[in-house]
Amino acid sequence: MTDQNLPAEHSSDANLPAHANEALPERFEDPGLPPHIPRRADVDEKAAKRAELQVVALFTLSVVGTLVFLVAYFLIDIDARAYVIGIGEISLYHVVLGLSMAASMGGIGFGAVHWAKTLMPDTEIVEERHPQASPQEDRDGAAAILRSGWQGSQLGRRPMILQSAGVAMGLFSIPLVVQVAGSLGPLPGEELYDTNWRRGLRLMIDPSGTPIKASDVTLGSVFHVMPEGFIGEPAHENLTAEEEMKAKAEDQVILVRLDPSDVKSQKQLDWGVDGIVAYSKVCTHVGCPVALYEQQTHHLLCPCHQSTFDMTEDCKVIFGPAKRALPQLPITIDDEGYLVADDSFREPVGPSFWERG
Amino acid sequence: MSTNSGIPQGADSLRTSSSAGATATTEKADTSPKLAAPIVWSDERVGTAKGMRFLLKKVFPDHWSFLLGEVAMYSMVICLITGTFLTFWFVPSMGHVEYNGSFVPLKGVGMSEAYASTLDISFDIKGGLLIRQLHHWAALLFIVGIALHMARVFFTGAFRKPREINWVIGAVLSLLAIIEGFAGYSLPDDLLSGTGIRAMAGFMQSAPVIGSYMTFFVFGGAFPGESIIPRLFIAHVLIVPALLVGLFTAHIVLVAVHKHTQFPGPGRTDNNVVGFPLMPVYMAKAGGFFFIVFGITALISALVQINPVWVYGPYDPTQVTAGSQPDFYMWFSDGALRLLPGWLEFTVFGTTWSFNIFLGSLVLLPLVWAIIIAYPFLENWVTGDKREHHILDRPRNAPVRTAIGASAISIYLVLALACVNDIIAIKFGLSINDLTILFRAMFFIAPIITFPVVKRLCISLQRADRDLVLHGTETGRIVRTPEGEFFEVHEPLDEYTRYTLVQHDRQEPLSALEGVPTDEHGVRKPMSLGYKTRRALSDFYFKDQIQPVTPAELAAAHSHGEHDALESGHNHEALPSGQEQVGIDQGSSAK
Amino acid sequence: MKKLAARRRSPLALMVLLLLGLTMTGTAYAALQPKADPGTSAATSSVDDIAAGEALFQANCASCHGSNAQGGVEADSIESPGPSLIGVGAASVDFQVATGRMPLNAPGVQAPENRMNLKFTDEEITQLAAYVDSLGAGPAVPDEQWLDLEGADIAEGGRIFRTNCAMCHNSSGTGGALTRGKYAPSLMNVDEQHIYEAMLTGPQSMPVFNDNNITPQEKEDVIAFLKDVEDGGNAYGGNSMGSLGPAGDAAFVWTLGIGLLIAAAVWLGRKAA
């Protein structure tokens, strides 16, 4: 056994002055591994037998779990529901499969570890370490190979090879990089500056796609709005799914009616209709829909990072990480009394980008 | 007793040692074991036996904290298994479909194929929901395991020479793990994860100069486009896992090369590793632990719902849900985005600089990992320590390092909690505005408070260790001397316990070790800026260090404090007459 | 209800439903014009009810809302003694009083739901509503037709909910935070009638969703969607951890989740007895 006879020269104290009578060592000496204390199963055959049975029981539990899983997989209806105390409603199928798999896996795991802990040797073993560094001989050998290789390649004598190879190696990956980077997507162009809103497009309720009369917008109400032709059936018919999603991402607008006496900005009233105002719903921070409208305070809150905009002050930021006010959509009324856009947005909507200015 | 190359034979060998007959037969059978035929076959072709001899003897020390990395490793394996299953049914496409599966509340709703196939996996594939939940829970446990493993390695100084490379690999692995997680939970294209991708587009767009180009390249055009899910899919199932598995293999190979570190204790040195051999103990323990991790993950997946995408609905850019958070490992970044104030964005010469956005995202992530990767090299530069370290530091014995780690964690926690400010607000009836302001302040205050508190705590613990070594443990017995003085009888530590408390190295600042550099005439030499910084940092690290007790100090303590030397073996009779022993609670002892 | 919805999913049914919805929208539009003449909804209330309601009002509400329900001094601020109740309608009274929000116990950022402690009987609430309605008609208590959830389309309700409601109330209807300590309450276990009335009247921070914005049929769909969630329609994979999304998952995995694994690791690393 190796536990007690740990050689002293392996301890870190080996190079300290020997224990003299008058001079105490600078550091305590390593007393070596403490004596091994046997476990119950080491000395008591009954305890060992008990441990053996426990391990067998755990492995058997695993087998039972596996069988239950198989039976459940084929016999339980996938739509069956169960009520479990402490959880509530749950899919019966799911919970039985999950628990039986837990038993199937856990049984093996706990069984194996219990077996190792109680019955396998628990006397600690000492493995020697050696310095990571290679012996000097190996270092010298490696250096010799490197040098003779360098000489054999003649790179030292013919520097043009070295230089041209270096340039070639430095450049060969560029075509690959250009191919992938250049083809991943189109250049942004003017896309970030414009939306689908145009003068005369009706404001339509999202998602039903019904037009809105000014009288529909009562004080305190809020409408989530998309431009005519970009929501509901017409959009499904005329646009690809990608175009429809893009429209939703940039054209979404929030529409409310404010008491004109609350509004602090004349521009805001001028761009609206009798206190009805429309603003881009895309946050100027990172672009979540700023959709939480508090009708008493007239605050708009973004649920992602809590930028707060004051609708009575031209949607200026009053709290949170956004900097810019939400862009306002100028609106008016058409011949039939429906709300329409008077113009497109006059600035880019959504998150900031470097070249927007 | 045993002839088997020093490997102990377990319970049976101890018991049978008393009955010679039984031993004789076992040993005879054991003396010349032969390899099984298949192993011989493969040995003749690839030299299996050499590798087995090397590997099966490997010794692993027992400590629960050494298993945190295994939690991460096994969770990754579970993710690989369940993730492979999921790819059989998942459709990584943003093509539009009308849902017609068995989940009634979404019937007829338009959605992407990715979302529809996730619903199918959840409701129409037998056991699919279990596999999905296993995959997601294992992913969370993977990252929790990594975080705790990393903390263990940091606080015990296991990153020191020769393990710096493995620390760097581990740090890169942890970054890859959270990228993998982000890509993974974005794949179902549900309202919650779609909002996360929307935010990602927003912060990529904020990058100076290249922002809008980068966004259009990654999304294949304007947000949302139809490319991001397929691209994230290939990143999630191929690119990142390949890197993860490759680097992870290197991580494990280096563990084998370096052999495992061990906690200090009697018999444990920088030149050995003490523990249990792979064959058979760790084969059963580590192998069994895989099944334990799998079993517990299955138990959790059976009983606790995770990422119920059907609750969130399909992604629609006009919609959003209250309580939109990413998975926890992205919280620190999202929290930073919530805390950074809007005035950090400004316009110069017609260009917009959104520091409020890119500081918390594009800068923060690389910055955090750069600091993590740089730390071992910084500490090594300060200490100038060239030795190999295989004995772990007890965190208290490196008070400044421990305090640095704790302060870093406190900043991280502030950022992470800032990301759930709306949840905290509603659960505790607070205001999100107040919470945001509080977290902004805490970002600066938390580390300033944490650092000295943790450092002092470590130093107190070191002092307590010293006291324990010098004065032994309190026995609770109070003794009165003939002079009427009361003292408590202390029992000295046994040498094994004591060694654990005194084995660590003395640590002294450069200013104490090297003094003021002078030339041969005793004139102060000018110090280079680098050396000055190093000296200052060395002071910062080790000025308040409490040194381990030396044998001389212990001897002095014994001779000075006569009563401390009284052994517990001394009883009534041994005490001179006139002294009485009073049984008082040790806490109320008077001196 | 689920079965019904499942069967209705043919293109023809969709057309019929669309037609039906449009017809109903029109009808509802005519019947429930928010600016209806005073008295249209009050017509059903007897003079006795109004008188009894006035007595209740004077005793319980007038101190904040004024003796003529004209509102307190600073009627516009949130912290004011109550706002004017002229024209808020019976639906508003029923919502506020029958959910226990009014009478308010103490001023705060928001009147909390308090169904455990209702001050009035159903009859008294009707009387109170009749009185307030008589002062200037507003939205009436919804018709039973829109509350029975018969033929309601859960999926359509879910769509409307996610566009108009989920940003405050959470996609699972469990509520969420607003600014400065205000909050959108949980919608679980709320009476159908009260959900409807809340959409119609926009109590406190909540905006109004009048019948031109969300039609009565759509409101019924939304209620059906919420009732389906309440009945466990979303519960498949186990405990939902309070429907907190990733925050709940994180809370679990950092406590019990990793705790179980660490317990197993401690057991594994400890020497057996």
Image (cartoon, grey):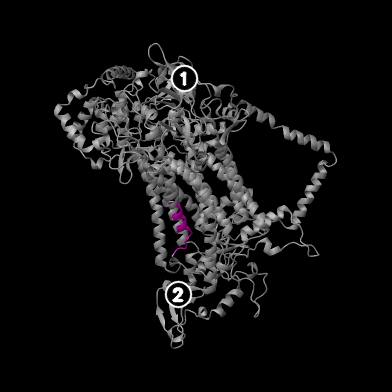
Q: Is disc 1 surrounded by few (<14), some (14 to 19) or many (20+) residues within 10 Å? A: many
Q: Name the front one of labels 2 and 1.
A: 1
Q: Does B218 sit left or right of C110 as displayed?
A: right
Q: Which residues are magenta?
A: C260-272
Disc 2: which chain? B
State the separation of the CA atoms marked 2 and 1.
84 Å
User: Where residue B146 sits: x, y (%)?
Assistant: 53, 48
Q: Which residue is mark 1?
A: A330
Residue at screen point 58% across, 50% down: B252
Q: Does C237 sit left or right of B186 as displayed?
A: left
User: Where residue A356 sits: x, y (%)?
Assistant: 58, 26
Disc 1: which chain? A
Q: Give B123 or C196, whichever is nearer the viewer.
A: C196
Residue B310 visible at all: no
- State which quarter of the image contains the N terminus of chain A: bottom right
Is B323 colored magenta in this rendering?
no
Q: Give B572 or B499, whichever is nearer the viewer.
A: B572
Q: Which residue is mark 2?
A: B475
User: Where residue A65 sits: x, y (%)?
Assistant: 38, 47
Residue type marked 2? Thr
Query: In what element is the residue under mark 1?
Result: loop
Disc count in the image? 2
Residue at screen point 68% across, 29% down: A175
Is C264 colored magenta in this rendering?
yes
User: Where residue B101 sits: x, y (%)?
Assistant: 38, 28
Compared with residue B144, is residue B344 higher up or lower down, i.e. above or below? above
Query: In what element is the residue under mark 2?
Result: strand
Residue farthest top in this picture = A335
